[in-house]
Amino acid sequence: MRQALIMGNWKMNGSREEGVQLAKALAEGLNAGSQEVAVCVPFVYLSDVRGALASSSIALGAQNVADQAAGAYTGEISAAMLADCGCKYALVGHSERRSYYGDTNQTVASRFCQAQKQNVIPVLCVGETLEEREQDRTFQVVDEQLDAVIDAAGIEAFANAVIAYEPVWAIGTGKTASDEQAQEVHQYIRKRIADRNPSIAEKVQILYGGSVKPDNAKGLFAMPDIDGGLVGGASLDAKGFLQICHSV
Ligand code: PEP
């Protein structure tokens, strides 16, 4: 049985005070359950939010991590720094990083490896654009995104990683993949891992992301290969995000 994981991605939103208040509201409102909850917070607020979550089970995550270990990389944040700030998770290859900031499958693979070297669990984001889906290239794109990391890190690395399937056309657009559309790709991803290592495939958590909301979370999370969600916009509202967390 895989543990459900619900992860909020705050993106570049909020102030220090808003982040702390949101974290406190989540810590207070989260019912004890079998699911794990995490929030991916802007780098500069990690320590504040860590403090606000101190007495709760909610884990801390970052939204990106450097593809290098340390050194002259102005503006970058290393995996060691994230570990130092108490991060359990780091997103790698979010579609906004891929499309606006030049992340490639290779740099994403390097970020993934750097995170794991510091015991920060990488959350590998994969997913196709609308154009790629319309060209029937969804599986090919997901294969390329997964394979770059498998080639760099080895399939065994997925024993300690999370995958998030996020169709780019569903992120921040209000368009959610149907439960069946999402399940089809999740099942495909699990099979691709299983072809190399069935026991890792059975254990790896695959989250769905793309306009998850309180009213669609239950259906998505009920799918057999969907192990939780990566939630952007709806994670900024404590009440709504808690409702999503309680939908597993
Ligand atoms: C995301 O940022 O990963 C995401 C899925 O955003 P949203 O829920 O707003 O679509």
Image: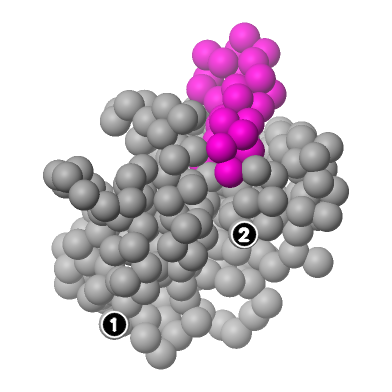
The image quarter containing residue 107 is top left
The tag on residue 51 is 1
Residue under the image location 60 percent in, 63 percent down? 5
- In this view of the protein, which residue sits in the foreground, 140 or 65? 65
The image quarter containing residue 239 is bottom left
Q: Position of residue 131 (x, y in %)?
A: 52, 14
The image quarter containing residue 155 is top right
- In this view of the protein, which residue sits in the foreground, 73 or 213? 73
Type of residue at label 2? Asn
Q: Is residue 164 visible?
A: yes
Q: Nearer the viewer, mark 2 or mark 1?
A: 2
Q: Is residue 50 above or below residue 95?
A: below
For numbered disc 2, what is the local secondary structure?
helix
Residue under the image location 51 percent in, 34 percent down? 170
| C-alpha gap between disc 2 and disc 1 | 26 Å
Our reading of the magenta stretch's main secondary structure is helix
